[in-house]
Image (tube, coloured by chain):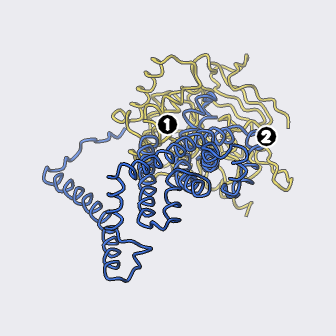
Amino acid sequence: MTAIDVDAAPLADADIARVLRQRRQDARLRVVYGAGFPIILLLIWQILCMVGVIDVRFFPSPANILATAYQILTSPDEGGRLLADIGATLQRLVVGYLLGAISGIVVGVAMGLYRPIRYAVAPLVYATFPTPKLAIFPLLIVIFGLGDSSKTALITLAVFYMTAINSLSGIIHANPIYQDFAKAFRIPPLTQWLRIALPSALPSIMAGLKLGIGQALIMVVSAEFVSSSDGIGYYIWNSWQVLDIARMFVGLVVVMVIGGIAVWLSNLLEHALIPWVKH
Amino acid sequence: MSLTALDSSGQTPGAAAGIAAHLGGIRRSFVSTSGLVVNAISSISLDLVEGEVVALIGPSGCGKSSLLRILAGLDEDYSGELVWGDGGGHDQGRLASATVFQGDSTLPWMSVDNNIGLGMAGLRLDKATIRRRVERYRDLVGLADFGRSYPSELSGGMRQRVAIARALATEPLLLLMDEPLSALDAQTRLVMQQELLDIWKKAKSTVVYVTHDINEAVTLADRIVVLTARPGRIKEIHRVPFGAERNVLELREHPEFGRLEAELWRLVADEVGQKL
């Protein structure tokens, strides 16, 4: 039997230091380039505003947006309103997203594992999937009223489709050799679901969760554009209507930050849930 | 199609001592999408003796993999009888058969130890026994230092050894191997062949080994079953005279090795030729 050398031919300390130094340097470059490029774009924008190429009435300079943001945040009245709007949006987002994600994963996994459910439910899910969810928003208002519920329901619906379809495809498109293994070794059903089928579908489920974030943001902002008196979507739309363009841009930045934080959190979750997939 | 197969866990009184499994007139047909019936296996009868290594060879499409899937319990849609010998069944903490697949079948989300342990989930074993078997067979396949490693941290050959340990740990009546080394490079394959011989000897396994590699069949098997082209029947059975103490390199210089390999080549080529 061949022995496998785990500690054969140790590297010299100098070599290890060199490899580590290269890695650190690469990590630094990633940060510098990744942050540097957007900063350069912002600078170009700023310069074009200052030399008068861009109409600052519609595209205020980054410095102006920053100043407006500072002004809003330091004014108790304006700042309080912005925070209240952010709070309203976050509440709809979180509740709608969680409801959609949980129900989507449950239905998707059930469709994947149990054929009668798949045959009954999957055609309906696929047939209604291409319908723009926003198109049935009026219907949701009729059902759930003008308050938070209809907006939350819209988000739930959008996230549900993303997670259900991706969970289903994760289960049925998992490597068939895993199922052969489970059957050939007579693995009991519950063990098979929890330790083989579900983990094999996790990368796809995770992809559904990430796509759901984008969907949820689109839905919450759209719903708040159309029918709301609070929320960050309302904040943006209202600023536009009163032609307070700098304030509108502050709202846009807030949406971007919310989206960025959500994606960052989902990446953390992804690393924790599926460490075996190389990212 | 009638199903006369016994339950794989069932004990059959009257099964001859020393017989790990008895195949009696196994047939398998497939129905194509156009409704055409394709006979894959037509009446294969064979007794698998405890402790022997039987290689199945034959032209591609001869049904050797189909036969293996029947033995593995992956295909229950056959006719004929499949009777397991004494000592089988769940009560004894053994699987009737355990399979090492052609492709990588290790689960990437669990460690080597958990991969091996999961294979025993269908047996009613207590935790301590599972633990003991995991360690024993993990060490046996030469992965003593890799119990906590994940498959992605191992080479292809090492992952295949995890799959072998997982199958061995169920202490199966029949260890089924479906071209387990075909995905490996030539050097690794040679090393693994020697390891398989050593492992089988230590684990006292009864093995059914499917391969398209005649050289490998002669290297590893005690008996070689040559199947005909579709529908697969047994064409000839050859006994390999080398015994359990083999060295895969020295074996190649043995005059009988070359003679047997050439003869088997002729048999298989004959079958392929009839098909062309």
Q: Amino acid at mark 2?
A: Arg
- Res. B250 mark: none
What letter labels the chain drawn in yellow?
A: B
Estimate the x, y position of residue A234 in percent, counting from the top left. 53, 55
In the picture provided, is A207 more to the left or to the right than A134? Answer: left
Estimate the x, y position of residue B188 in percent, counting from the top left. 41, 49
Circle nearer the viewer, 1 or 2? 1
> Quadrant location of residue A129?
bottom right
Mark 1 and mark 2 lie on one chain; the one further toward the N terminus is: 2
Tell which residue pokes out farthest to the left in this image.
A14
Estimate the x, y position of residue A94 in percent, counting from the top left. 52, 42
Q: Chain of mark 1?
A: B
Compared with A70, A276 (above or below) is above
* Residue indicated by mark 2: B27
> Quadrant location of residue B68?
top right
Residue A252 makes an appearance in the image:
yes
Compared with A236, B7 (above or below) is above
* Residue indicated by mark 1: B164
- SS assignment at label 1: helix
What letter labels the chain drawn in blue?
A: A
Q: Amino acid at mark 1?
A: Ile
How far apart are the alpha carbons under marks 1 and 2? 28 Å
Q: How many marks?
A: 2
In the picture provided, is A109 more to the left or to the right than B203? Answer: right
Compared with B143, B233 (above or below) is below
Judging depth in this view, the residue of B241 and A97 nearest the camera is A97
